[in-house]
Amino acid sequence: MRKLYLNFQNSETLSHLLTWSHYFEILKADNELEIMFYSKQAEKDRWSVRELKRQMKSMLFHRLALSKDKEGILKLANSGHEVVIPEDIIKEPFVLEFLNIPQHEQYHETDLELKIINNLQQFLLELGKGFAFIARQYRMSIGGKHFYVDLLFYHRILKCFVLIDLKKGEIDHQDVGQMNLYLNYFKKEEATEGDNEPVGILLGAYKNNILVEYATASINNQILLSKYQLYLPDKILLTNQLNKLLD
């Protein structure tokens, strides 16, 4: 109760949308910035207590904050996470521990995709607010050939299709070229009046930042690359990285 008073001395900052159980979990956070963020985000996204606990356990605040500068981190804490541009939907990394795939287990991309479909509710929580699932293995017929994008979503805030291709290993330049083909198809054949240009996300276990820079340099389409991991983040490592940004 003392910690609740110290962090929420102005009673108007308490939300009627959150229960005592929410605040009980939020107050377990290590610092004021985290407490501010999780209280704002839990209210905005209407998280259940279970969803809140998962987001805190997966270090959501740290994963979002590490892609920002100091000013951006403070804004994140004060206002919560806002999706305004496509880059705002990316996390580094995406955490897929709910798939229950052991870290060193051999698996195929189809196995990863199937497990995501079987745990779609949790995957949508990890993606964040605004995603609506449309299809898996969505077929595109281009020049007499069939192509398939692993996962297709529509983002109701950005008002655009979001195509996700899963890569078991490292993302390479060929993956970027293929996604560019898909996005060109969607712009011409699938988008309707009122839709913004589609966004492609390549989600791999690894990415080479230098290769990514050169592969995407002359591409006009919005292609985002990010890593996923099958286990919860190292709290100490992320905290140290965040502290360096805040110094």
Image: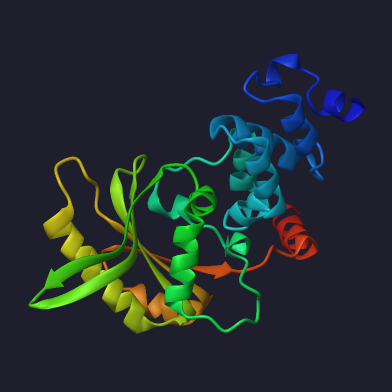
140 above or below 51?
below
Q: Where in the figure is residue 214, as x and y percent of width and height?
A: 38, 79
The residue sitting at 22% across, 45% down in the picture is 195
Q: Position of residue 71 (x, y in %)?
A: 61, 45
- Give whichever of 106, 227 is nearer the camera: 106
Furthest residue toward front: 118
Question: 194 left or right of 116?
Answer: left
Point 62% across, 81% down: residue:
105
Residue 155, x across and y down, in percent: 35, 46
Q: Is residue 156 visible?
A: yes
96 up-or-down from 18: above or below: below
Q: Is residue 214 left or right of residue 15?
A: left
* Residue in view at x 53 percent, y 81 percent: 107
| The C terminus - image quarter | bottom right
- Quick one: 62 or 15, which is closer to the camera? 15
The answer to whether residue 93 of the structure is visible from this angle is no
Q: Is residue 46 left or right of residue 113?
A: right
Name the image quarter holding residue 97: bottom right
State how many labels appear: 0
